[in-house]
Image (cartoon, grey):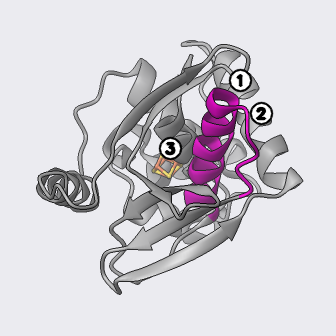
Amino acid sequence: MINVSDLNQYGYCPRRYWYLHFYDTQGRNYERIDGKTTHESKSTRSDWINEIYLESESLGLKGCIDVLDDNGEDVIPVERKRSQRGQYYWNDELQLAGYCMLLEANISEAVPEGVIYLYSTDERKRIRITERHRESVQEAVSQIRSMTVDDIPPLVDNPDKCEKCSTRQYCMPYETALLEPKKAEGTGWEDRI
Ligand code: SF4
């Protein structure tokens, strides 16, 4: 089964997911370490933490939901994010959608929305889970399952993402674009060499 948090890695860049899972990197960057530390410190607060581990064979997903917000009518998964810019991205939504789907598979109730909580701005962003989210989750699970060690995904088509990527030292997008320009075609890297 695929870990829901891996949907986030995959959504950011499939190549990054490949390195993290097949290359055995210990690559970490500030955001990942600090995010983990923040999670750990928050998890000692007993008043709002409610971590819950779930699996679904039919979805092919497993994972731990940070917080379940039960307002009496709905149960809403909350995913906490450290984001210096106070923003969240499509890969964060993909992860949240994965948790919503995992939860509804376990409680047999619709979970139509989730929340992304941003530490930096102390904001709760409600995200409606659409068909596009659901299809993207299923597609990501299918594509992750079909990945193999000898088939590395191409460079991501947004070089800005590479700036903060902890696997950049293994992926070497600049060097790849320089030495194997065909592999950089259409990624934006061809304009940076
Ligand atoms: S450096 Fe860029 S292309 Fe390489 S894995 Fe990271 S995000 Fe993907």
Residue 153 shows up from this direction: no
Decide: few, some or many residues near mark 3? Use Cα within 10 Å; few <14, some 14-19, many ≥20: some
The answer to which of marks 1 and 3 sits earlier in the sequence is: 3
Q: Is residue 51 above or below residue 161?
A: above
Q: Is residue 131 left or right of residue 35?
A: right
Q: Nearer the viewer, mark 1 or mark 3?
A: 1
Residue at the disc numbered 2:
138
Looking at the picture, does residue 19 appear above or below residue 127? Answer: above
Dominant secondary structure of the magenta stretch? Answer: helix
Q: CA distance from mark 1 to mark 3?
A: 18 Å
Q: Which residue shows up at 71% across the image and 23% down it?
A: 59
Q: In the rendered structure, which amino acid carries the disc numbered 1?
A: Leu
Q: Please determine whether, in this image, residue 22 is positioned above or below residue 115.
A: above
Q: Residues within 10 Å of mark 1 (few under 14, many from 20)?
A: some
Answer yes or no: do the residues labelled 3 and 2 have beta carbons within 8 Å? no
Q: Is mark 2 within 8 Å of ligand 1?
A: no
Identity of the residue drawn at 43% across and 19% down: 22
Q: Position of residue 138 (x, y in %)?
A: 77, 33
Name the spot of residue 18 as percent of width and height, x first: 51, 29
Label 2, label 1: how far apart the Cα atoms are: 8 Å
Let me know if residue 148 is in the magenta part: no
> Is label 3 or label 2 in front?
2
The N terminus, quarter of image: top right
- Whichever of callouts 3 and 2 sits on the residue coming sooner in the sequence is 3
Residue range highlighted in magenta = 90-112
Q: Are marks 2 and 1 in contact (CB under 8 Å)?
A: yes
Q: Mark 3: which secondary structure?
A: helix
Q: Which residue is mark 1?
A: 59
Q: Is residue 98 magenta?
A: yes
Residue carrying label 3 = 9
